[in-house]
Image (tube, helix red, strand yellow):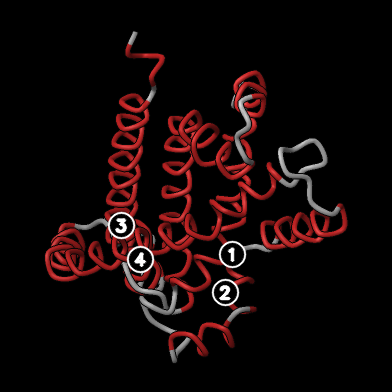
Amino acid sequence: MNQFQRAFTRESLQEAWEIFLRDFPAGLWDTVYVTFLATLFAILIGLPLGMLLVAGDEHGIRPMPKTLMKVINVIINFLRSVPFLILIVMVIPLTRLIVGTSVGTTASIVPLVIAAFPFVARLVESSLREVSPNIVETAQSMGATPMQILLNVMLPEAVPSLVDNFTLAITTILGYTAMSGAIGGGGIGKIAIMTGYNRYKYAVLYLAVIVLVILVQIFQNVGSWIARKCDKRLKH
């Protein structure tokens, strides 16, 4: 019997179930807590940044200097291209400055936000660009200011798409939380890596994967339901 097979004996499965009952409730709470907070902060940063990318474009409703827009795009593309595990290490000084430590559940929020807000900004940009130019031109002809067009025309029109994209963001961040367990983050990811993988308790690892898959399905279904409710086209 090899090492993998030994991990799924009756005794190993019983031990995995005991670990599940003992550790998973707290791990689940930590995962949900970190995911929601990181998503919230990522949206708070990414939403206005995405609006700026659309409005400040050369053909946008409030064109900004090309140099400024290029710098913003380069920063966003750079942060999006850095692998998350490397990014966690890169921002350790910033994490210590903000949280006081670079290890633990709360500390993992900082790199999660830094990794997620450029992604959210691009999602917001994509959603706003889907808004019909005719609607924007109509608002402009009525004398609406760029800020009024953004807040009162483009954002309301883009709500269903934004909800879908924010759902994508939260499921992506949930996946990042699992990776943060490799370097001291808490939650289900820590249980999967520290207990399941490092100690060869593969049944625990699979249980963690199942829990994460269920969480993703819940977030996805709830987000899709909200998006449908917000879509005015489906109400006619």
On the rendered structure, is 99 left or right of 201? right
Assess whether mark 1 and mark 3 are in contact (beta carbons under 8 angstroms): no
The residue pinned by badge 1 equals: 84
- Spatial CA span between label 4 and label 1: 16 Å
Q: Residue at x 30, y 26 (%)?
A: 229
Q: Image quadrant for the N terminus? A: bottom left
Q: Amino acid at mark 1?
A: Phe
**Label 1 Cα neighbours within 10 Å, binned few <14 / some 14-19 / many ≥20:** some
Which numbered marker is on residue 196?
none
> Residue 62: where, in percent of width, then height?
73, 44
The residue pinned by badge 2 equals: 88
Which numbered marker is on residue 208?
3
Assess whether mark 3 and mark 2 are in contact (beta carbons under 8 angstroms): no
Mark 2 or mark 3: name the one nearer the start of the chain. 2
Q: Secondary structure at mark 4?
A: helix
Q: Amino acid at mark 2?
A: Ile
How many discs appear? 4
User: Residue pushed farthest front?
Assistant: 143
Residue 6, located in which quarter of the rendered image? bottom left
Assess whether mark 1 and mark 2 are in contact (beta carbons under 8 angstroms): yes
Q: Residue at x 83, y 55 (%)?
A: 70
